[in-house]
Amino acid sequence: MEQRDYFEEVYDVVRLIPRGRVTTYGTIARYLSLRAGARMVGWAMNGCHNRPDVPAHRVVNSVGVLSGKHFFGGPTIMQQLLEDEGVKIENDRVVDFKTVFWDPSVELVL
C-alpha cells in the first residue's frame, strides 16, 4: 500500500469520529489492521495539518492524553477544539475518557 493511500484510509476513519467523541491512534490502527500500529496513525495525523476536513483533534493517546497538542499551532488549540465540542479536558487529559471514547470496530457497521 502506498503511503498516500494509507494516510487517506486513516483520514477516512478520523472523519467518521462524531463531534464530542475521541478515539486513539491504536484503535484506528487496529480497525485498519495496520501492521505498524499507532505510530503510523500518528504520522498520518502529523501529515494532515492543512486538512481542515480531518478532525485530528479527536485522536488522543491510549489513556486520553492530548499527546499531539503541539502539532496544532499552539499548546491549547487541541484542547479548545475538543472543549468547543463538549469534551472536558483537565491537565491535558480527556475527563471521563471511557464515556466519550469512540471505537470504529464497535460503532461502524461494515
Image (cartoon, rainbow, N blue to C red):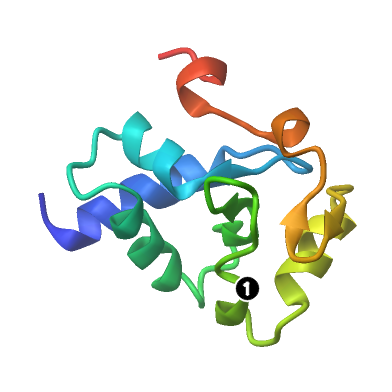
Percent x, y of residue 18: 69, 37
Question: Does 81 appear above or below 5?
Answer: below
Q: Residue furthest bottom?
A: 73
Percent x, y of residue 70: 59, 80
- Residue at image coords 57%, 19%: 107
Assign the C terminus to one quadrant of the image. Answer: top left
- Residue at image coords 30%, 35%: 32
Percent x, y of residue 67: 57, 66
Depth check: 24 or 86 in front? 24
Q: In which quarter of the image is residue 90?
A: bottom right
Q: In which quarter of the image is residue 30?
A: top left
- Residue at image coords 56%, 38%: 16
Asked whether, in this view, residue 13 is left or right of residue 91, the answer is: left
Q: Residue furthest top?
A: 109
User: For the residue marked with disc 1, what is the amino acid?
Assistant: Lys
Category of crowding for the residue at label 1, using alpha-carbon neighbours closer than 10 angstroms: few (below 14), some (14–19), many (at least 20): some
Asked whether, in this view, residue 52 is left or right of residue 37, the answer is: right
- Residue at image coords 83%, 48%: 87
Judging by the rendered image, the residue that carries numbered circle 1 is: 69
Q: Residue furthest left?
A: 1
Question: Does 35 appear above or below 4?
Answer: above
Asked whether, in this view, residue 17 is left or right of residue 36, the answer is: right
**Label total for image:** 1
Q: Is mark 1 on a helix, strand or loop?
A: helix
Question: Does 74 appear above or below 35?
Answer: below
Depth check: 56 or 62 in front? 62
Percent x, y of residue 44: 36, 62
Question: Does 105 appear above or below 40?
Answer: above
Depth check: 76 or 2 in front? 76
